[in-house]
Amino acid sequence: MYKVRTINNISEKGLEKFPRKDYEVSSEISDPDAILVRSQQLSIDDVTPSLRAVGRAGAGVNNIPVSEYTNKGVVVFNTPGANANAVKELVLAGLLMSCRGIIDGIEYVSSLSDETDKAELNKLVEANKKRFKGNELKGKTLGALGLGAIGSMVAEMALQMEMEVLGYDPALSIDAAWRISRRVQKMENMQSLFARSDIVTLHVPVLDSTRGMINEETLGYFRDGSVLLNFSREEIVDGQAISGALDSGKVAQYISDFPTLGLIGKPGVVATPHLGASTDEAEENCAIMVSEQILDFLENGNIKNSVNFPDLSLERGKGFRIALANNNVPRILGNVLSILADRNINVIDMLNKSRDDVAYNLIDIESEPTDDLVADIQKIEGVINVRVFGE
């Protein structure tokens, strides 16, 4: 019986993926095999001896101490792309708010609630609508910093709106590259992206290399009077720097999904309360995806969409399976194969991949591994953990 602990409200559509005859799923489990979480902050104290995986029902994992979990051999999964459409649609709202007097216009109309004369109401509206005149997005240049699951969808949406689209992503994956239209002009660096864009939209994760990347220096490359959209993460933008850019007119508007102290109510700032993935559909998609990934990992050892271990999937056949996580150093796999050979255990199939400082192996064998065999493998210096799967 596998045990899965839920933190936050995980959509039932996802939890239904776990067969109740094989899984106990509850928020009260103290010694889980896996944890499902949305936004709550986790710590190293949440790692129990039984914990093998954490599934984040969302893309960002800044609420999980990933490096510490990696050292414990805990695989951290996320759900890239599951909420991409929800965020894309909110970016569209941000684009429209940036160029049309929508918010000010709504506020003006709300101020007319005491009017009782229809003719006078129409007169006021017609006389004042020029105050909220805006511009069309068609023909404007959008610069997308980050072209992953969300950024590529935003780029395609902008192309359909007849905008000129520029893109820059220093960590562009092969899969992401296939999704991007040829009409997206690839920039060599973010400085050139900023210099050519009327509107810049951010779609990068929070990493040491991206934290505060929109700062006083990089804002200097922006066009005067440009617009910055941040539906990615608050930490990517330096609050003081963007405040100064708004004061100077370098940036005309900052539209963000992350209310920031010192910017709330500031002219030129529009902030929504972190609505990016807050749709029923996105929550269901994330829960289903992360549940399927956790289930496949617990039952077969396969890894898909991990942020700290290599993706590795091997179809189950006859025989038994050993899943091995180890430090990415020489001779560990060779030592494991030697132990199997010494016991005349035939290897049916095998996959090995590494990612940064860790490696992961799936080894299918004919004979059922004994406790002594597993113990000998675990004793190899550099081995993090060993799991065994039956026929």
Image (cartoon, rainbow, N blue to C red):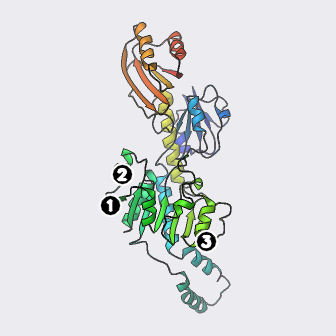
Q: Is residue 317 visible?
A: no
Of badges 3 and 2, nearer the viewer stands: 3
When the figure is inspected, residue 228 is found, relative to residue 303, above or below; the finding is below
Dot 2, how many residues are within 10 Å of its Cα: few (below 14), some (14-19), or many (20+)? some
The quarter of the image holding the N terminus is: top right
Q: Label 2 belongs to which residue?
A: 179
Disc 1 element: loop
Disc 2 element: helix
Picture mark count: 3
Q: Is residue 272 left or right of residue 79?
A: right
Q: Is residue 179 left or right of residue 92?
A: left
Task: Report the Cα–Cα distance between label 1 and label 2.
Answer: 12 Å
- The x and y percentages for residue 260 are 65, 60
Q: Label 1 belongs to which residue?
A: 183
Q: Amino acid at mark 1?
A: Arg
When the figure is inspected, residue 373 is found, relative to residue 359, above or below; the finding is above
Of badges 3 and 1, nearer the viewer stands: 3
Q: Which residue lies most toward the left here?
A: 182
Q: Amino acid at mark 3?
A: Asp
Q: Looking at the image, which residue is at 39% across and 68% down?
A: 163
Q: Label 3 belongs to which residue?
A: 247
Task: Report the Cα–Cα distance between label 3 and label 1.
Answer: 35 Å
Q: Amino acid at mark 2?
A: Arg
Q: Looking at the image, which residue is at 36% across and 45% down?
A: 174
